[in-house]
Image (cartoon, grey):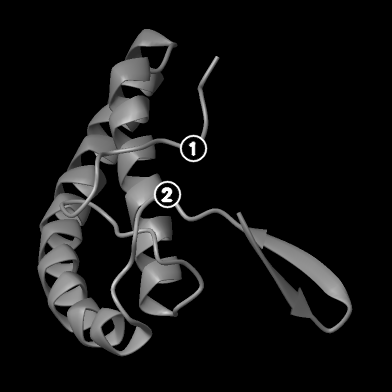
Amino acid sequence: MAKKKFKGLNLILKDKKPRMSERKEAWFRIIVCIVTGIVLGVWKILIIVLGIVNWLITVFSGKRNKDLAMFSEYWNTENYKYIRYLTFVSNSRPFPFSDLEKMSEFG
């Protein structure tokens, strides 16, 4: 673990694997952002349709479809990772350059 000092605060950054230089990473972000932007854009259309379907299921059956909600949560998490990567907050690459993740569980 490498420690960096930021205005009196200690931030701990975990290095999982060797990274390319910051300059190369910045240029690579262009490719990642274009490809991921297209994937998330198409996925967003599907999420909107599935959200309407899940709403109809909930209205008529009285309970929501948890599988559709979980699928939407994957999109939410990947969209969040995409924005963080795009704004240089994180070096964690979004899908399809990393595995799918979800941040929360539905009960």
Closer to us: 87 or 70? 87
Residue 54 percent across, percent down from the top left? 30, 28
Q: Residue at x 33, y 66 (%)?
A: 19
Can residue 65 be seen at all in this image of the molecule?
no
Q: Would you say 77 lies left or right of 95 here?
A: right
Q: Are marks 2 and 1 in contact (CB under 8 Å)?
A: no
Vertical comparison of 73 with 54: above or below: below
* Mark drawn on residue 16: 2
The residue at the point 35 percent across, 9 percent down is 61
**Is residue 91 in view?**
yes
In the rendered view, would you say 90 is above or below 106?
A: below
Q: Residue at x 28, y 25 (%)?
A: 68
Q: CA distance from mark 2 to mark 1?
A: 19 Å
The quarter of the picture where the C terminus appears is top right
Q: Left or right: 32 with respect to 2? A: left
Q: Quadrant of residue 33?
A: bottom left
Q: Position of residue 2 (x, y in %)?
A: 62, 62
- Numbered disc in front, either 2 or 1: 2
Amino acid at dot 1: Met
Label 2 packing within 10 angstroms: few (<14), some (14-19), many (20+)? few
Q: What secondary structure is marked by label 1?
A: loop
Instruction: Please tell me whether residue 35 is drawn above or below residue 97 in the rendered image.
Output: below
Q: Amino acid at mark 2?
A: Lys
Q: How many marks?
A: 2
Which numbered disc flags the more N-terminal residue, 2 or 1? 2
Q: Pointer 1: what residue?
A: 103
Quarter of the rendering containing residue 65 = top left
Horizontal and vertical percent position of residue 57: 30, 20
Name the residue at 19% across, 79% down: 28
Of 20 and 80, the residue lying toward us: 20
